[in-house]
Image (spheres, rainbow, N blue to C red):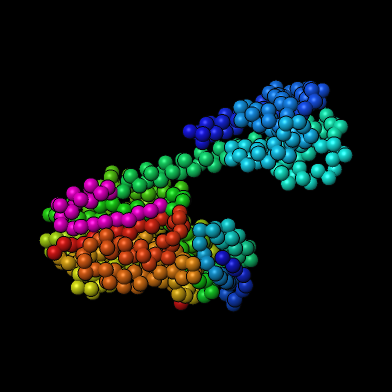
Amino acid sequence: MDEMVLQNDVKQKAASEDISDAKILIVDDLLLLRELIKNYLSNEGFKNLYTAENGVEALEKVREIRPDILILDILMPEMNGFEVCRQIRASPDFSQIPILVQTGVEESEDRLEVFKVGATDLVLKPINGAELVARVKVHLQNVFMQRRQALYHQRMASELAAASKIQSSLLPSKDQMRQAREKTGFRMLAFYEASSELGGDFWGMRLLEGGRLAFFMADFSGHGVVSALNTFRLHTLLNQADLDWDHPKLWMQGVNEHLCRVLSVEHFATVFYGVLDPTNSTLHYSAAASPPVVIGTKAGDGELIDTSGLPLGISTDAKYEQKEYPFAPGAYTLLYSDALIETEGEDGEVLESEAVLAMAQERSSEMDPDVLINGILDIYPGKDRRPLPDDLTLLAFVREV
Amino acid sequence: MEYDIGANGSGTVCHLSADLTFNDHEAFRAMLDDAVAQASGEIVLDLSKLEFIDSAGMGMLLVAQERSQSEGWSLAIDKPQGQVQKMLELAKLGQVVTIRS
């Protein structure tokens, strides 16, 4: 609740650009000086001026009116200015308020002490009105600028978070995966975690006639907003375009032609598209530079299959190959985004595809996608870093016996 | 990314070292500008000292290729090693850019 109040406060304050709207609290035990300072400031157009005559009253007013700046005397009854500074700086809500302290020449030894307890700046007594006003303005301008920046960052962060949520919602849900398993006999699991920025990872699947299961995994080059927008583009394309889902090679060429039209030169997508066919126990696939895919069996054998190919979106002349691989009961396949093999661990080492294969083989006997994926996450060099440096997607399909 | 630009018998050679990744867009563009300004004939990107490339880095190579076509000079990529070579082969980049081992 407090945080929300504070955030609203920040928004309202930042929205008013004009520093003459700033709330200024003047603390001095002498009425004459309070009035003098008020006078200097109101002559300069400042409208929201408040006063307090001792330290205790100052702290109450700080909580009550949330001033944008404090002009504070040091020698006062009840509680002196040092203690006011200390208490304000100790309070998380007010630790950022600029405090402009007034000190007499005779208090020269105190001046260092003033900064130690948290004052932002000081003015010497007797007060020079023009100097006081100039210093107040400088500090208020800083405060207002910082608030605008904080607000901007806050808005960017919440927009990125919202976009990231939308992006995740494009991925197949647990329910869809369960239904696909019931209809095809392929058990699957995906791990997806976005990095702090938006990313370019995307995967999906589709049920085809004859209990076949089609799936793809794509990774757009670069990262950040541009890659994320490209995943939205691909999602739209896959739902609208007349793609040949039965023939991986033609699917790949269709997607490539479209991406060549919409992507700029330096952007492309690495893609793997596969169709698992239970009738002939075969994986039909076509690849465009996706990281090498693991394929193996319950018995512990396995290999990295060839996934080379020109990434999509580079050349309309590109031709893609279609390959087959046996996928009998007891077979599994494991796909991963390049973050898995490009993220450096603390020792600066990256994980090789061969190590991914070895771990998959070690975990294959249980034929459980969960066991496979957790095994890989265990050896992922970025596993202890949050947020992840790059989006990570792992995808496992198992053909039940 | 670090680089220096020199000449060989037939053109201008950019020697790239360290990594070519997302953060190198500006440096890579500046390097190309320099190379094009000095070039007579072919521009060669010598990758023999380049240790790592990611997808954004490959995108920059494609930008160089595109630029060579629109500006009418020729581009070649020389001696990729290790991970860089693996990545270029995986992406079959030889289909669109001249790559020499």
| Residue A295, above or below A245 | below
Residue nearest the observer in this picture, A103 or B77? A103
Could you tell whether A368 is left or right of A138 in the image? left
Give x and y (percent) for residue A383.
41, 61
Whether residue A139 appears in this view of the structure is no
Q: Residue at x 46, y 59 (%)?
A: A385
Residue nearest the observer in this picture, A4 or A81? A81
- The quadrant the C terminus of chain A occupies is bottom left
Q: Is A190 covered by the magenta stretch? A: yes
Could you tell whether A214 is left or right of B44 in the image? left
| Residue A18, above or below A236 | above
Give x and y (percent) for residue B7.
61, 74
Q: Residue at x 37, y 43 (%)?
A: A166
Residue nearest the observer in this picture, A87 or B74? A87
Tell me which corner region of the image, top left, top right, bottom left or bottom right, holds residue A17: top right
Q: Which residues are magenta?
A: A172-194
